[in-house]
Amino acid sequence: MTQVSKHQLQPEMGDLIYTEFSSFVAKMQSSDAIDHFFNDFLTPTEKIMFSKRFMIMVLLMRGHSALHIKNTLFVSNSAVMSVNSWLKNASESTKLGLEKLNKEKNWETFFDNIDVILDKLPPGKYHDWHHLAKEKALRNKTRIIKSKLK
């Protein structure tokens, strides 16, 4: 868990600092510059936390179940429900940006790449290895067919 100081900032000061921070990121000229900044600025744990939260959001937007998300990303139910609640209460500008992202991004290729990575991981304990091997073979066969159709 990310460490948070027990000494709270005044809300006005926190808002002012956050506004400057978001303005700084918005003024960056390229996605490479933003990528370099966040690689320098965030700890490995924070990167994982933000990445998982983002992926939970994407999977929820694409209609995946909480159980699927939990098992795929190795997150808790509360993490999925927290992001789901955030999505439902997001501002209109955030929702428009998310819809645009969902339409523009080739998520099929992205998820195929994720499946390749997940297929390399051994199943956790208490799983039926035989059943999981069949699922893995089916996913691999589907990827091969998709790539031939492109």
Image (cartoon, helix red, strand yellow):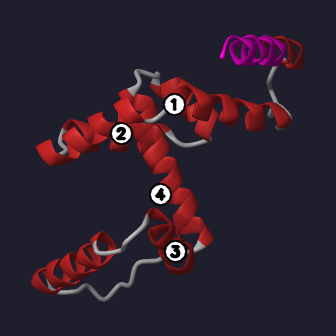
Q: State how far apart marks 4 and 3 are (Cα).
A: 10 Å
Label 3, label 1: how far apart the Cα atoms are: 25 Å
**Amino acid type at image mark 2:** Leu
Q: CA distance from mark 2 to mark 4?
A: 17 Å
Tell me the quarter of the picture where residue 6 sits.
bottom left
Q: Which residue is mark 4?
A: 50
Asked if the stretch drawn in magenta spans residue 116, the answer is: no
In the rendered structure, find residue 101 and report the number of the disc placed on it: 2
Which of the 4 quarters of the picture holds residue 84? top left
Q: Which residue is mark 3?
A: 42
Judge depth for marks 3 and 1 and give the one in front.
1
The mark nearer the N terminus, 3 or 1, is 3
Query: In the image shown, does 72 or 81 lie closer to the viewer?
Result: 72
* Residue at mark 2 to residue at mark 3: CA–CA distance: 23 Å
The amino acid type of the residue labelled 3 equals Leu
Residue 21 locus on image (x, y percent): 28, 79
In the image, residue 59 lies at what x, y percent? 46, 31
Residue at label 1?
107
Residue sitting at x 62%, y 41%: 74
- Secondary structure, mark 3, is loop
